[in-house]
Image (spheres, rainbow, N blue to C red):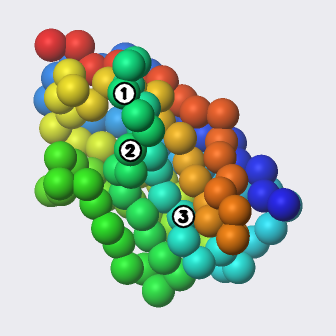
Amino acid sequence: QVQLVESGGGLVQAGGSLRLSCVASGRSIRGINLMGWYRQAPGNQREMVAVINNAGTTGYADSVKGRFTISRDSAKNTVSLQMNSLKPEDTAVYYCNAQLGVHYWGQGTQVTVSS
């Protein structure tokens, strides 16, 4: 099993930046091929934001390309999401995800972008 704990959310003005971190425990992320960040805004379905595999290959939702960067640090067992040029429509609860045949989720961290 994998436990995921997110941090770094908060309130920021449009155009600002935040960095989210997800610390994994119970298993080294070296053994997790695919990890990522998802988000869910009120009234919306949860959507993929960014994913990264063990080879460092990344994928992004079109809405965040060029603004968000996902990275993984095996030494710290952490996956991070650097979010720049934030927009009000980025407001959501952000969830860390690990895929090991089943999906593991963190508890989520709130990101609020004011206009």
- Is residue 115 placed above or below 47 in the rendered structure? above
Decide if residue 82 is on the left or right side of residue 30. Answer: left
Q: Say which of 98 and 75 sits in front.
A: 98
> Which residue corresponds to mark 2?
47
Quarter where residue 6 is shown: top right
The answer to whether residue 94 is seen in the rendering is yes
> Which residue corresponds to mark 1?
44
Closer to the camera: disc 3 or disc 1?
Answer: 1
Q: Distance between the residues labelled 3 and 1?
A: 22 Å
The answer to whether residue 16 is seen in the rendering is no
- Helix, strand or loop status at disc 1: loop
Residue 1, how many percent across, how many down? 84, 60
Q: Quadrant of the C terminus?
A: top left
- For the point 46% across and 50% down, the residue is 37
- Is residue 88 placed above or below 76 in the rendered structure? above
- Helix, strand or loop status at disc 3: strand
